[in-house]
Every structure is written in C-alpha cells, then in structure tokens.
Amino acid sequence: MRLNILLLFILVIFCNSCSEKTDYYNLPSLSSDKNVNAVIEIPAGTNKKIEYNKKIRTFEIDKKNNKDRVIEFLPYLGNYGFIPSTYSDPKKGGDGDALDVLVLSENVEIGTVMEITPIGMLKLIDKGEIDYKIIAVPSDKEKKIIDIESFNGLTKDFPEVKNMIEIWFLNYNKEDEAIINGWENEKVAFEEIYKNKLQ
C-alpha cells in the first residue's frame, strides 16, 4: 500500500514537471556558440498573426475584435519572431516588446529556436514607436536559402529581397501608420541587440 502511494506521488511530481511550459521569452539571447538566438512565432509563408504570450507561455493567434488576425496581404516572407531576453524600452521610444526578427530561410515550426546571423536592420517606425526589425539568416550554412553574411551582401547581391522586405512591412497592415526610417548594417543590428539585452 505504501509502495503504491509512493509511486503515485512520484508519478504526480513527474507529470507536473513534464507539463511545465518553456519560458521562451527568457531564453538566452545568445547561444553557447555566441550566435544570436531567435524564437519563431510565425513560420514563413503564414498569413495568421501568431504571438507568444509570455504570461501563460503559449503561442496564440492574435485577436482583433474577437476574430483571428489574418494578414490580408502576401504571407510572411521569412520566419518571424523575436530575440529572447531583449526589451524595446517604451521610455526610449520602444514598443515594450522583445526585438523583432525576420529570418530568411525555409519555414520552420512555431516555437523553433534558431541560431541566426543578423545581416541588417530595418528601421521601422510604427504609430510613432520604434519597431526595428532585425533581418537575419540561419547561422547553420545548410539551412541558408540565400548566401548572405552581411548587409553589403544583401544590398549588392539581393537588392530585390531588400525591396520586398520594405514593401511587405509597409503594406501588410493597412491600419498601421508605418514609415521606414532607413536601414542599418549588421554591426548596428548587433549593437541594437546588445543594447536591448536583459541578461
């Protein structure tokens, strides 16, 4: 009888630990290899606006007027998400969220944590708030779809991709009053990440 109670107690503890959800928001900004980490909320090619709810640690479809938010434009051009353990401070003009990242690669599952190499930063201003977008590629060469290592490579070898990114962010949400305040290179993108790191 005592053995059964002990086994039941162990089983309950084990199940509770298994059901604990990953705290994606507070994962390290950098991997053990010193690459930048990105948490993917929205896979490439998706039209639904999915966001990570850090309070209950789940990925949810964003709602507007009790309806799922669907992008009524082209789907996301890359895997979209955030850089964990970063914070865009509203006191400094930020939007109060983690830094956004667009990873140019084949689509991956929601909740994927990818090691990335920033190649630039789109300086988007959304409703007067800083909403900069880190543009990146996977650090793993086998996962790359375009061979870019820098902003110069994006501008020189893939100017059409750069133009598509601009067009997409200016048009995916017709209700937003977004403007582009220019681009920055990979060095400034890294500086932005480090400047906004919480750890």
Image (cartoon, grey):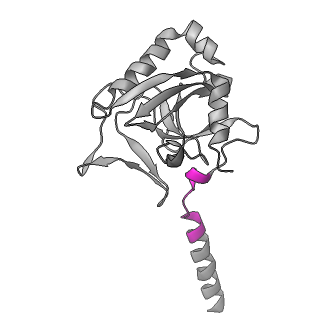
Q: How many marks?
A: 0
Q: Position of residue 102 (x, y in %)?
A: 51, 30
Q: Is residue 139 magenta?
A: no
Q: Position of residue 132 (x, y in %)?
A: 51, 33
Of residues 136 and 93, the one nearer the viewer is 93
Q: Quadrant of the N terminus?
A: bottom right
Task: Looking at this view, name the residue that lies furthest to the top.
Answer: 156
Q: Position of residue 22 (x, y in %)?
A: 57, 56
Tell me if 55 is positioned left or right of 184 in this view. left
Residue 69 vs 190, above or below: the answer is: below
Of residues 181 and 163, the one nearer the viewer is 181
Q: Quadrant of residue 174?
A: top left
Task: Looking at this view, name the residue that lies furthest to the right.
Answer: 33
For image coordinates 62% across by 43% down, the residue present is 196
For image coordinates 67% across by 33% down, the residue present is 191
Residue 55 vs 110, above or below: the answer is: below
Task: Looking at this view, name the residue that lies furthest to the bottom.
Answer: 1
Q: Quadrant of residue 19?
A: bottom right
Tell me if 146 is positioned left or right of 190 in this view. left
Tell me if 124 is positioned left or right of 184 in this view. left
- Residue 116 visible at all: no
For image coordinates 44% across by 24% down, the residue present is 180
Q: Position of residue 163 (x, y in %)?
A: 45, 14
- Residue 157 visible at all: yes
Residue 19 vs 29, above or below: the answer is: below
For image coordinates 56% across by 11% down, the residue present is 155
Of residues 11 and 31, the one nearer the viewer is 31
Q: Which residues are magenta?
A: 16-26
